[in-house]
Amino acid sequence: MTEHTPTPGIHHVTCIAGDPQRNMDFWVETLGLRLVKRSINQDEPGTYHFFFADAEGSPGTSMTFFPWAGAPAGKVGSRQAARTAFRVPEGSLDYWESRFDEYGVDYDSRVERFGETVLPFRDPDGLPVELVEVEIGDDDPTVPWTAFVPEEHAIRGFHSVTLWLPDPEPTGDLLRTMGLEEVGTEEAEGDTPGDERTRFAAGGPVGKYVDVLPTIPGGRQGRGTVHHVAFQTPTDDDQAGMRDAVRSEGLNPTQQINRHWFRSVYFREFGGVLFELATNGPGYASDEPLDALGERLVLPGKFEDRREEIESNLTDVTIPRAEPVEADD
Ligand code: ZN
């Protein structure tokens, strides 16, 4: 086996959404994430690419979407990251349930999983999402965004993804190659199709876990499903080493592709889920000041020359703003 640096965890998760404004309103206002980048799908410039993250767009916090009003509904199922979970501070799920009641969010009863409490819900496109209570230390690398949700309840980056797979074994071996360790197996709960959930853990504090569940075929990509899961390979060298390692397992990674805010390698893992390896740099603050992230439509590289044409093909969206608190007088 080649020498390579283990991945510290998930870098970002990218999903398919429907109406762009509805997607923006939910992830920014209801869930309280920060819009850190408003751009286009570099493979399809007629579609937006939104990036929602913590206050600084830290690795392990960005949930990104290709929103497209005409996107056909997908079906969550096998060969997909069927659940995406975020960390929230211990004791904050009461707040979240009240907020979900207030905003009319479709949520389920809490479940216990590996000793942690999980609140499952769905976004407006039906994408299954979970909040998991964890202890957030003073040295936590994430930076909460507090425009809509107070710091003591704010989402603090990814907790995990759950992969639904026809056969979890080869994927488990791949996760070990990528540097994750199997930490346990327990009976699956709730609406999950398989009967056993196996958890793998990476070394970093954020985006640490990947769970795998056996399931029968039946997923279809579309609105309300995950498109791919990206893992952190902090430097180009880390990425090249990891690329060699997954190649030596028989997979077929792409060459490095410049995604402007990070550099990426893609491959489909053994169960059919699209994985990406993403560098930590240059980062979302490399082309906009930190205090103005997401304010303007950013068109990377060659697309800037086509700004007028590209903007005319995109529907207008309004970024939700927190109302200034009015003093009683
Ligand atoms: Zn990606």
Image: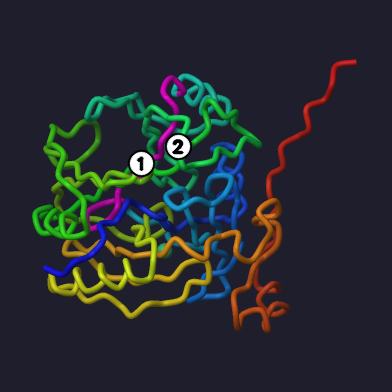
Q: Residue furthest right?
A: 329
Q: Which mark is residue 205?
A: 1
Q: Closest to the observer: 191 or 306?
A: 306
* Residue 36 image point, x, y percent: 59, 54
CB under 8 Å between discs 1 and 2: yes
Q: Is residue 33 visible?
A: yes
Query: Residue at left 59%, top 66%?
Result: 39
SS of the residue under disc 1: loop
Comparing 123 with 297, the one in front is 297
Q: Residues within 10 Å of mark 1 (few under 14, many from 20)?
A: some
What residue appears at the point 45 percent right and 37 percent down from the top-left corner? 140
Q: Which residue is mark 2?
A: 140
Q: Which mark is residue 133?
A: none
Residue at the spot x=30%, y=59% of the render?
220
Quarter of the picture holding the C terminus: top right
Left or right of 65 in this view: 135: left
Q: Which residues are magenta?
A: 76-92
Q: Look at label 2 and name its amino acid.
A: Asp
Does ligand 1 reach within 8 Å of label 2's beta carbon?
no
Q: Secondary structure at mark 2?
A: loop
In the rendering, at what x and y percent does residue 165 appear? Answer: 17, 54
Instruction: Say which amino acid is labelled 1.
Output: Pro
